[in-house]
Image (cartoon, coloured by chain):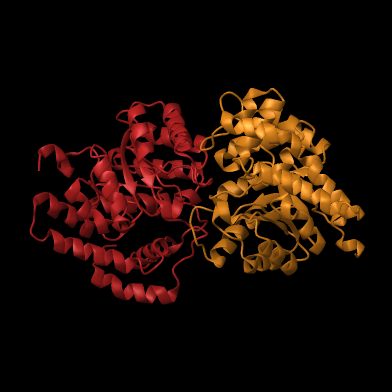
Chain colours: A red, B orange
Amino acid sequence: MPAADRPQDRPFHGIWSAVLTPLGRTFAPDHKAFAAHARFLLDNGCHGIAPFGTTGEANSFSVAERMAGLEALVDSGISPATLMPGTGCCAGPDTVALTRHAMSLGCKGVLMLPPFYYKNPSEEGLYRAFSTVIDRVADSRLRVLLYHIPPMSQIPIPHGLIRRLDDAFPGVIAGLKDSSGDWSSIEGFIRAFPELAIFPGSEQLMLDALRIGGVGCISATCNINPHGIRAVFDAYVSGSADTDDLQAKATAARQALQAFPVIPAMKRLIAERRKMPEWEQPRAPFLPLDDAAWTTLDGVAAECGYLV
Amino acid sequence: MPAADRPQDRPFHGIWSAVLTPLGRTFAPDHKAFAAHARFLLDNGCHGIAPFGTTGEANSFSVAERMAGLEALVDSGISPATLMPGTGCCAGPDTVALTRHAMSLGCKGVLMLPPFYYKNPSEEGLYRAFSTVIDRVADSRLRVLLYHIPPMSQIPIPHGLIRRLDDAFPGVIAGLKDSSGDWSSIEGFIRAFPELAIFPGSEQLMLDALRIGGVGCISATCNINPHGIRAVFDAYVSGSADTDDLQAKATAARQALQAFPVIPAMKRLIAERRKMPEWEQPRAPFLPLDDAAWTTLDGVAAECGYLV
């Protein structure tokens, strides 16, 4: 392939962890545990960290909590060049505040949900929502990855919207995370926007995506399988013969996790393995993984090769 | 009917306007126009005002904007006993902050959405979300109306949740707004919880609801038809022979509006009739009503008897 198309040469690429947010006894984010976990992920294969996304329970935290959590990562010595926080909220002013804050810390980019309370918005309405945010942030360093996650947000990102934003703000729209889980959707984004960094929202379709111009993945499972997912990426980059086998192994590890509620399952796994009981708590409406499910997960974790 | 069951004798009753939020040139709430409109509604039939609900574009505003808007109503002289603001957000701390603020102003109650980003929460998870908020607000004056609006929030309020909350916090759960538009749902809530104030989220089903123990309605259309909807309520209370005719008239006025995007349509109608052009702007992702739709709406508004 031409050098310019190699994923490792592109500004946004690799495997990014949609990092979990550990809580303390009062259900507030535990900054020390948060920074330690992010460091662990970067040391074990992740190219970067995507804090306060869906897996990070972003929308369950206030703007102030999200800002303080992000600052804790940077203050701990994590390079902001490895950080791509979620900043998209229902309220435009919140999205502006979080995006400005991320830029002020030097974050590489932001992952932006559309406003998601009102359903079936028009493309023009979404364009105004995103363009208002970009205008108000008014920072030439801004790099936005749009967040397409219809199962949760219920608000798809249409191709026409991306094209209009890309035309209006050249260089600002850097890519898109597609958490639809639908190959035809991912393929459609990659084919239509080869200049953008298209990240599948799971490692399951990463290799297929890399082969047609995708750049990696932003995935929840990177919290517990960073090395396994990185191995797929590295094998693809080096043209290794075992690339497909490594993908199959990562996919199996992902599918095993998906038998459980993903956020509580990973939180409990980390709590148990690191003997940090507070790690197991999600914020409501999520519940901790129950003991019966934990017993099953405990059994499958070793064969999946999770690293915790 | 026994006096105790008469809607007009119950602590929460009547017709409440899910009030629109007018914006100024910078798309920030226009406090003067907001207070003037709320006063107009109270003077023309509304028993109360429900600011920052779905119609008020609540989730498009930051916590600070919502607090400032509510304060503007109270500062203008509107009695907090006529106010029931929406306070339910995705993030528990935001819900706590808005609810405490509403209580500190003396509001009669709050209308509380469940956290709505994560879909298919368990009943236990919703219980923890609501009970955490009530615990943290820690105010014996708190009166919560739960907000059941599955088409928008995607998160129904199950009967089991209401029963558990009512058992755990006697007197705090005061009622429920049902915006499902589904009579069997409304009837189910009224039959199951006769002690709670069950408000249909539209006047269309108000009379049917009043006849089996409902208490009125909390409706978007109260912004432009307060007198017409109040007439139904008063006719029912006084046992007037024309009650059904008045309901039919109010229903027709509602259905005419529903041919348009409701928020932009009402905003444009007010902007045109009051010659206040800024009134027509919603916040993205909504768009102002386009001229073709306005021409149609302008034609039907008179025969519907809208009062603006």
Residue A1 as seen in the image, left or right of residue B99: left
The quadrant the C terminus of chain B occupies is top right
Q: Which of A137 and B239 is in front in this view?
A: B239
Picture quarter containing residue B303? top right
- Residue in view at x 45 percent, y 27 percent: A136
Residue A229 as seen in the image, left or right of residue A75: left
Residue A16 makes an appearance in the image: no
Residue A137 makes an appearance in the image: yes
Residue B79 as seen in the image, left or right of residue A228: right
The quadrant the N terminus of chain B occupies is bottom right
**Can you give x and y, in whole percent of width and height, for residue A96 in the image?**
46, 34
Residue A149 as seen in the image, left or right of residue A240: right
**Can you give x and y, in whole percent of width and height, for residue A86 in the image?**
40, 44
**Can you give x and y, in whole percent of width and height, for residue A142 in the image?**
35, 31
In the image, residue B261 above or below residue B149: above
**Can you give x and y, in whole percent of width and height, for residue B87 in the image?**
63, 47
- Residue in view at x 54 percent, y 63 percent: B125
- Residue in view at x 54 percent, y 37 percent: B286
In the image, residue B104 above or below residue A127: below
In the image, residue B98 above or below residue A173: below
